[in-house]
Image: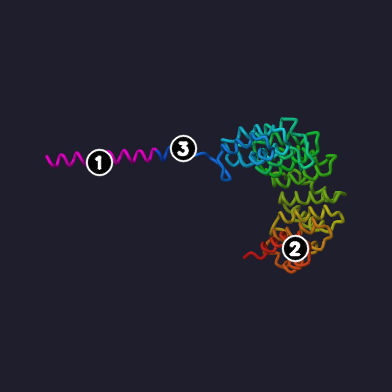
Amino acid sequence: MVTRQRFTLLLTVACVLFCLGCGRDSASTSQIQTQEPGYDGQPLSYWLTQSKSDSSDARKAAAWRLGFIRPPAIQTLTELLKDKDEQVRLSAVTGLANAGPAGIPVLMESLKDEKSRLRNNARSPASQQILVLQVLGTMKAKAAIPVLTELLKDKDCEVRRSAAWSLGNIGPDAKTAIPTIMELFNDEDRQTRYAAILALGGIGPESKEALPVLSTLLHDKDSLIRCAAASALWGIGINPQSTTAKSTIIELLKDKDWLVRHRAAHVLGEKGPEAESAIPALIELLNDKEVPVLDNAAWALGEIGPKAKIAVPALTALLMTGDPNDAPLVKEALEKIEKK
């Protein structure tokens, strides 16, 4: 009898403990399920409220942060793309970029809006449409390749140029756009021709059909086009054209046009250690009278890395006697070169 009572008591206690445990688990699960997503120390609801504020600065601040919250915020970002304030719309584009793949369909759809072409504020470095094109390229959005290819024929040279850049940035997957990109080699706009040629280098070996034309462009009367052709040939990476291209770019570091010197240094920096043979010429460029050229030369030496150790004295002297505004960039270059 005593044993049975003890058993009943133990069973009762066990049931109570089990129920209490379930209660805690249930409460814990409920808390997890109802926990609101957020960003930058604020919940989603806060940023959604800010996105509807009368203050354009508040809406702008909310737009790029909402992107990090992703799916729950996509609809709000879509609405902000049509905000009356241009800066808010541009911030919404950035927000959709922050959202990753989930933002790509919305960005592509926004290209159909003719109003996205407009630039209403002098503070804006680009229209909404141009920013969207650049973002799609940066995101390597394969789904956007057909749309970008079609925009290579746009009436606006800035749109054509940006579409070409984006396709080049997407890389080999954009090979279907090569024939249309090559049509831009005869574009009336110099910068568009430049962007189209560079795009083929970004696409890489898949652009080998353009080798004969690019080889001819190495002798173009426009040194900027020669620089682009050399960069593309190097990017395609098929010898002997690739070797010739490298020599051409190094030679262009001495071009009389500062923009060409600037671009040539940038191309070499993008190649990193592969540009080792350009180190002496880049060191000379540290004395260039044009600050953007000097900056690109210092940056390129840093990108080449430890192989550019012979540039340390020149960079150190520049750090001590040069423009203080250049100091952060020069310091970064030295750190990369001296990195163990």
Q: Secondary structure at mark 2?
A: helix
| Label 3 to label 2: alpha-carbon separation | 57 Å
- Please state which of residues 309 and 231 is positioned toward the viewer in this rendering: 309
Quadrant of the image occupied by residue 4: top left
**Residue named by callout 1:** 13
**Image position, residue 169 (x, y; %):** 69, 44
Circles 1 and 3: CB atoms closer than 8 Å: no
**In magenta stretch: residue 12:** yes
Q: Earlier in the sequence, mark 1 or mark 3?
A: 1
**Residue named by callout 3:** 33
Amino acid type shown at disc 1: Val
Quadrant of the image occupied by residue 333: bottom right
* Residue at 63%, 40% in the rendered image: 62
Q: Earlier in the sequence, mark 3 or mark 2?
A: 3
Instruction: Describe residue 18's horizontal placement relative to residue 321 as left or right.
Output: left
Q: Residues within 10 Å of mark 3 (few under 14, many from 20)?
A: few
